[in-house]
Amino acid sequence: MLEYAWWIWVLILFVFTFFLGILAVMGGVGGGVLFTPIVGSFFPFHLDFVRGAGLFVALTGSLAAAPGLLKRGLANLRLAMPLALVASTSSIVGALIGLTLPTWITQTLLGIAILFITVLMITSKRSEFPEVPKSDKISTMLGIYGIYYEASLNRAVEWKVHRTLPSIFLFVLIGIIAGMFGLGAGWANVPVLNLVMGCPLKIAAGTSKFLLSITDTSAAFVYLNSGSVLPLITIPSVLGIMLGSFVGVRLLAKANPRVVRIIVIAILAFAGIRSLLKGLGLWV
């Protein structure tokens, strides 16, 4: 590894995250899931600092989007709050586990997790309006249902959910993974909300963003309290991702989403393999 002045790495990180922000928007993924494995594998920073910064990268985007999504009815509080409770609690547990384990074990497990996410992105299908024959007892008791205006259909769409209990257990696992590896959990939130619970895709995506603002805050506090959030890494990363996201939104209409998604999957697969081999000491 070549040695540079400290500010050179800060500048490189800012430029890198700027392009990462563009790619994340056009690829339809959160910046956190790209940031942690790539920066952790290819930059000379300790993995604890990278995971702490990764949570703030994911948190920044969700906090910016959450109020607007709630206002438009695309994120639902009754749906989000019980899931946020279990996910945020388990993310704290995940963060504590991640900070306790030796770095090589965390690096290896991160590589495995990223490769799993890559496979999930390749194989998972999404349904715009899933069929939910009947609400289950838990969702009925909690009053989880809603109506939102669907512009493409020019009408209001009513929705309800089912399979609430297995989904709660899945969100426990999602929270642990998010906290342990410093990943935003949108890659897992949306498939569970959409395919397991039966939320319309827009409600699933909007509620997922709102969930991240709670889940990532809990895990980020653990990293912040342990001294694992380094401003020299976190600040340029957050600024780069934000500016890149603004540009990505403007380029989205002109980009081929299929091509961009293939690029994102390829980068994730490479970063996952690199992280796995680095953790095992096979690729320094």
Image (spheres, rainbow, N blue to C red):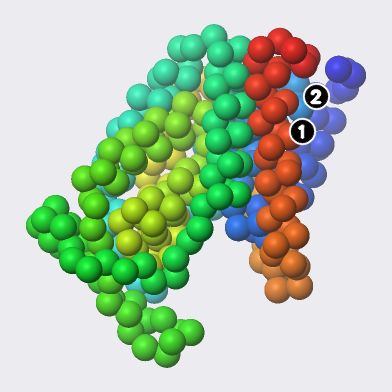
Horizontal side of 280 relative to 140 (left or right) equals right
Kindly identify which residue carries mark 1.
10
10 Å neighbourhood of mark 1: few (<14), some, or many (≥20)?
some
Q: Nearer the viewer, residue 120 or 150?
A: 120
Horizontal side of 161 relative to 269 (left or right) equals left
Whole-number angstrom distance, CA of label 2 to CA of label 1 = 7 Å
Horizontal side of 233 relative to 150 (left or right) equals right
For the point 35% across and 71% down, which residue is it? Answer: 73
For the point 40% across and 20% down, which residue is it? Answer: 96
Circles 2 and 1, Cβ within 8 Å, touching? The answer is yes
Kindly identify which residue carries mark 2.
6
Instruction: Tell me the number on the disc at residue 70.
Output: none
The answer to whether residue 130 is above or below residue 101 is below
Which image quarter is the N terminus in? Answer: top right
10 Å neighbourhood of mark 2: few (<14), some, or many (≥20)?
few
For the point 22% across and 68% down, which residue is it? Answer: 133
Say how many tags the image has: 2
Q: Nearer the viewer, residue 122 or 63?
A: 122
Which amino acid, mark 1? Val
Q: Is residue 58 visible?
A: no
- Residue 246: give x, y in percent of width and height: 67, 62
Which amino acid, mark 2? Trp
- Residue 135: give x, y in percent of width and height: 18, 63
The answer to whether residue 51 is above or below residue 283 is below
